Amino acid sequence: MLFTIPFSHFCEKARWALEYAGVAFEERGHAPGLNRIATARFGGTTVPLMVRGSMVLSDSTAIVALADREAASREQRLLPDEPDALADALALEDRFDRRMGVASRAWAYSYFLPELDTLLPYVVRGIPPLQAALISRFPGALAAVVRRGLRIGPTTRAWARTRIQEDLDFVSERLADGRRYLVGEQLSTADLTFAALAAPALFPEEYGGPLPPIEALPRAMGDEVSALRDSVAGAFALRIYRDHRRSKAERGARR
């Protein structure tokens, strides 16, 4: 059982890793804040949270490691065998978790929260009907919970945009030697983590959770997303999605 907030990019990281590895799971989506009601009995306060028998994994990195251990083939693994490459991939994964993951989420919310009424169809997709009804009736309450929990304030957008650009520049520099992947010759957790956690700034079409199309975004946000997509690192993340994320129809058939 994988507990998620369906549109969350950290949940996308875990979901993508499991699907890429061919590990069967059932996803249980919940609304932000209300996810704690479902996960409290397992000792969890955040998602993604994976429960399998007595095993509870409450971190996306731990779920990636599980996917790697249970991958259907070597080609579907995400952790390199060679020690130096493994250390490099894990260090990059940790960097993107701490930087891009935090910044892209804050940046997207800084635009979304004032426009929450128009984005509700994406927020409520994949969650229980009662939660969807509550959020649809009281969107301001959800916005307040998110704003308080993530400390979204007047300076958030500028800070987050700077941090996103720093990580895009970092990845672009790493790709400057012509490599196709951040570590080694095949997809690793470094590439998957970067692409998934940059998704709130890039809006890839293959994203595994509900995201609005670019044309539905606030105009200023849409313009920035287009510019970020045109960067070397942005184009790289979109290619990783195109090349390594199964279609939504195929993903549905695997669950």
Image (cartoon, rainbow, N blue to C red):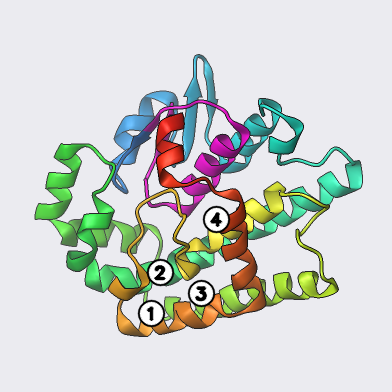
N-terminal of the pair, mark 1 or mark 4, is 4
Residue kind at label 4, given as amino acid type: Ala
Residue receiving disc 2: 108
Label located before the other in sequence (1 or 3): 3
Q: Which residue is mark 4?
A: 196
Label 2: how many Cα within 10 Å (few below 14, some 14–19, many 20+): some
Mark 2 vs mark 4, foreground winner is 4
Q: CA distance from mark 2 to mark 3?
A: 9 Å
**Span highlighted in magenta in the image:** 1-27
- Amino acid of disc 2: Ala
Percent x, y for residue 126?
A: 29, 42
Q: Earlier in the sequence, mark 2 or mark 3?
A: 2
The numbered dot on residue 221 is: 1
* Front position among marks 3 and 4: 4
The amino acid marked with disc number 1 is Met
- Which residue is the site of mark 3? 160
The answer to whether the residue labelled 1 contacts the one labelled 2, judged by CB atoms less than 8 Å apart, is yes
- Residue 13 is inside the magenta segment: yes
